[in-house]
Image: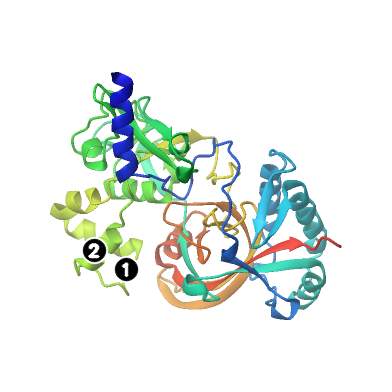
């Protein structure tokens, strides 16, 4: 009887909820192969169509980022497949391609010299935007820093929760092949498998208060909300020590953008929308905070790391070099080249203007809000500039992926 009830309950859930992982820093413990990619998302270019490969930060951090991708590639089976458009390469070949590229950039060639080398030695694939347009859309994320304590007290009253013991998942592919790669998250109850607690239940009804021991306590509720959005961050303790928290799990509830809500309610214009504007609005309208924050029922649970942050490949992200893309379309760990814009700050730390830039990047992360071939989230690192850039970047651009030609 319990089994039949469980089956019925699960089928109901299948019809209404196919939850996916949310956050820029996803479950690094998954050992499954990357999902099969949609080949139409990447189009192989002819050499005359290649862009000029100019790196605006003179290769800084690039070797570090490449070695992080190599760490991932050397831990997986050499035969694992990676799809670039209609072409397929295995992990062993990806390693060879990276190692060859490292020899090319060791002397920091000029953009013209590097472009000539890439035209003769590398295949280049462009990611298509919506409607097969040849452009992409960029947003950014960063590693926030919060003030916190290991024990609750005074103004430090907002918990940073680790993964609850009663949070479970169901692989929907066990029920039907059409749900391959899909999972739902919830908890067992006397009535079967039910959705896990939402944000309101966790934060306001405090349903986890006696279920989970917090990793830390912070004093800024809004900063904690954005920690959930970013997926990882630093918490500075009273003695100056820093603990790193990174995404471990999500409650399975759908992610809903409070920025979009505030635009629809005409409280912030679409043009002015940014993370900073949301903070400002919530600070100035505290009576509305509960309703606005609870509009997003998704809730993130964290784990402690020695350093960080780490992306979905389980490797440390490189500021300015790591990007998050849709893994159904873009090959994980791959070498990318991006073109978009970055902010120029004035002496007061505010945005003065935007300027074009291009650089190499590594596809080392993913996120539930990053959908389609023409979407990328650039990791800016930590600090004031990173926060400003991540909070305001919503610009068009281009994404290219590179792989060594088989005959080189």
Q: Is residue 51 visible?
A: yes
Q: Position of residue 267 (x, y in %)?
A: 20, 67
Q: Position of residue 100 (x, y in %)?
A: 81, 57
Q: Secondary structure at mark 1?
A: loop
> Going by the picture, which residue comes out furthest to the right?
408
Give the total of numbered labels: 2
Q: Residue at x 33, y 21 (%)?
A: 3
Instruction: From this view, report whether residue 204 is shown above or below residue 51.
Output: above
Instruction: From this view, report whether residue 69 is shown above or below residue 267.
Output: above
Side (left or right) of 185 relative to 313: left
Side (left or right) of 33 relative to 269: right
Residue under label 2, please give it.
262
Q: Between 386 and 131, which is closer to the camera in this rendering? A: 131
Q: Quadrant of residue 116?
A: bottom right
Q: Quadrant of residue 112?
A: bottom right
Q: Quadrant of residue 172?
A: top left
Q: Are marks 1 and 2 in contact (CB under 8 Å)?
A: yes
> Going by the picture, which residue comes out furthest to the bottom?
48
Please rate how many residues cluster around mark 1, counting C-alpha atoms within 10 Å: few if below 14, some from 14 to 19, many from 20. Answer: some
Instruction: From this view, report whether residue 78 is shown above or below residue 406.
Output: above
Q: Secondary structure at mark 2?
A: helix
Q: Mark 1 and mark 2: span between their CA atoms?
A: 9 Å
Residue under label 1, please give it.
273
Quadrant for the N terminus, please. Answer: top left
Q: Is residue 299 visible?
A: no
Instruction: From this view, report whether residue 335 is shown above or below residue 32.
Output: below
Q: Between 240 and 383, which is closer to the camera in this rendering? A: 383
Q: Between 159 and 331, which is closer to the camera in this rendering? A: 331
Q: Residue at x 18, y 48 (%)?
A: 290
Question: In the drawing, what numbered circle is on residue 368?
Answer: none
């Amino acid at each position: 009887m319990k089994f039949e009830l469980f089956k019925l309950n699960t089928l109901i859930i299948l019809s209404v909820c196919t939850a996916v992982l949310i956050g820029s820093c996803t479950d690094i413990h998954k050992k499954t192969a990357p999902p099969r990619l949609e080949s139409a998302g990447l189009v192989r270019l002819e050499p005359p169509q290649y862009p000029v490969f100019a790196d605006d930060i003179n290769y800084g951090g690039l070797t570090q980022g490449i070695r992080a991708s190599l760490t991932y590639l050397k831990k997986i089976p050499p035969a694992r497949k990676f799809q670039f458009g209609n072409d397929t390469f295995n992990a062993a070949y990806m390693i060879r391609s990276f190692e060859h590229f490292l020899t090319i950039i060791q002397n920091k060639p000029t953009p013209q010299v590097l472009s000539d080398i890439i035209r003769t030695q590398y295949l280049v694939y462009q990611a298509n935007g919506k409607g097969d347009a040849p452009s992409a859309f960029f947003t950014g994320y960063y590693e926030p820093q919060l003030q916190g304590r290991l024990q609750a007290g005074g103004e430090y009253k907002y918990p940073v929760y680790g993964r609850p013991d009663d949070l479970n998942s169901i692989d929907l592919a066990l029920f039907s092949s059409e749900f391959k790669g899909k999972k739902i998250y919830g908890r067992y109850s006397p009535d079967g498998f039910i959705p896990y607690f939402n944000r309101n239940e966790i934060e306001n009804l405090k349903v986890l208060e006696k279920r989970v021991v917090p990793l830390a306590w912070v004093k800024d509720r809004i900063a904690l909300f954005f920690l959930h959005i970013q997926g990882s961050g630093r918490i500075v303790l009273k003695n100056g020590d820093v603990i790193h928290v990174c995404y471990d799990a999500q409650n399975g509830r759908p992610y809903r953008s409070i920025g979009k809500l505030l635009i629809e309610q005409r409280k912030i214009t679409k043009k002015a929308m940014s993370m900073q504007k949301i903070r400002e609005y919530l600070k100035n309208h505290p009576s509305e905070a509960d309703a606005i924050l609870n509009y997003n029922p998704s809730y993130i649970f964290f784990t402690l790391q020695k350093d960080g942050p780490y992306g979905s490949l389980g490797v440390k992200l490189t500021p300015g070099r790591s990007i998050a893309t849709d893994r159904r379309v873009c090959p994980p760990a791959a070498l990318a080249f991006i073109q978009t814009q970055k902010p120029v700050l004035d002496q007061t730390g505010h945005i003065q203007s935007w300027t074009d830039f291009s650089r190499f990047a590594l596809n080392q992360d993913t996120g539930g809000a990053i959908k389609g071939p023409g979407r990328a989230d650039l990791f800016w690192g930590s600090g004031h500039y990173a926060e400003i850039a991540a909070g305001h970047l919503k610009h068009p651009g281009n994404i290219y992926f590179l792989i060594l030609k088989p005959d080189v």
